[in-house]
Amino acid sequence: MNRVYNFGAGPAMLPTSVMEQARDEMLNWQGIGVSVVEISHRSKEFEVLLTETDELMRELAGLPEDFEILYMHGSAQMQFAAVPLNLLDLNPAHKAAYLETGNFAQLARKEASRFGNISIAASSEETGFDRIPAFDPASLDPDTSYVHLTSNNTIFGTRWHQFPDTGKIPLVADMTSELMSRKLNFEQFGLIFAGLQKNLGPSGMATVLVRKELLGHAMSQTPALLNYVTYQKNHSMPNTINTFAIYIMNLMLKWLRDQGGVAAIEQLNAKKAGLLYDIIDNNDFYIGSAHKDHRSHMNVTFNLADSTLDKKFLDEALVRGLYALKGHRLVGGIRASIYNAMPMEGCQELADFMKDFAKQNG
């Protein structure tokens, strides 16, 4: 079996042990003679699986009891509409403030603009989204229903290392590329959502962690399957849930527990990123894309000083078993996405290749 190191931004690599268990159980899950993708979502077996997944998420994340765990269709981008539909009515002014750090933050803001009065409270667009913008929470209108940010920018390689204190105004965070990769103080947030396809499983589904006091305020035009209360009342199963996604998420959470939990994986992620940033910083052959103070631990973005070598770099990397290193089409260059499942060995292989390539072509 020739498994490469997959640096794809998402859908991202899963741990080999998780993939192997899913393979081995595909035809006969838990000895019942059918696959997990064939059983009823109303069956007692699946209800046990879903409840166990809740418990694993709450335990590993350190999620307080005043937060509800929801599993929803449509991955993260569906939440770009669900968040304003559920939260704008917290205040009659229907105002929300968005902090723009890249493409997905902009998409979220544009979608929210369909439903209320949306403002850009801070943006780093002028510098090509190479940093987290300065933001003073004191500048917020007290009538603001919520503040939205994207915690990690997968395209430009930046990250909120510290989150703003928005006081009584709920802070909403799109943590699609970071949830379960770093420890969080949930007292800072009103709602967190994340597509599963980076650190939690396959694409097409999202988990929403929402403070219970924020539920029940959906706008009147909110469709039932975008209303958080619909999911709260039905254990996330108002209709047929993605049973396979929940199954893989369950395996991913168990794998994370076996790695020592979120605190341990956060330390490892910092070391993986540091290994690559050290090469970028100490070799003028490579140029980092993100400001040093705002670099992501999940997506290491950089350019070659001589961009005509990009194709050669990518081709030779693939021969070395280093897959999907091409930068996003909006920015080009090179991007190494090193989510939880990427082992240190993969980052070391990439680091060694970068050294060799610079030596041979510099």
Image (cartoon, rainbow, N blue to C red):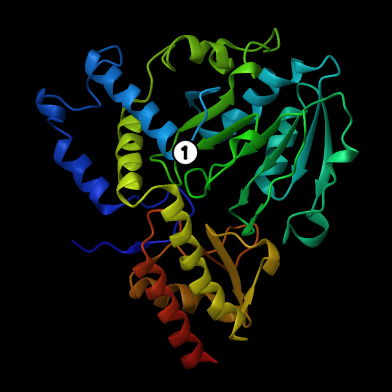
Q: Residue at x 20, y 47 (%)?
A: 20
- State which quadrant residue 46 falls in: top left
Residue 45 spot, x, y in % from top left? 22, 19
Q: Is residue 110 left or right of residue 216?
A: right
* Residue 18 point in image, percent of width and height: 26, 46
Q: Nearer the viewer, residue 61 or 153?
A: 61
Circle 1 is placed at which residue position?
61
Is 35 located above or below residue 157 in the figure?
Answer: above
Residue 347 vertical placement versus 59 (above, below): below
Q: Is 191 or 354 nearer to us in this picture?
A: 191
In the rendered image, is residue 310 in sight?
yes
Task: Residue at 42% x, 50% y: name it.
Answer: 12
Decide if residue 18 is on the left or right side of residue 29: right
Secondary structure, mark 1, is helix
| Residue 278, above or below 222 | below
Is residue 11 visible from the viewing direction of this image?
no
In which quadrant will I find the N terminus?
A: bottom left
Q: What count of labels does the image hold?
A: 1
Q: Position of residue 68 (x, y in %)?
A: 52, 22
Residue 40 is left or right of residue 75, and the answer is: left
Looking at the picture, tell me which residue is in the foreground, 294 or 28: 294
Few, some or many C-alpha atoms within 10 Å of disc 1 (few <14, some 14-19, many ≥20)?
Answer: many
Question: Which quadrant of the figure contains the C terminus?
Answer: bottom right
Give the residue displayed 51% in from the left and 87% down from the top. 358
Q: Residue at x 30, y 41 (%)?
A: 254
Residue 115's spot in the image, x, y percent?
76, 21
Q: Amino acid at mark 1?
A: Ala
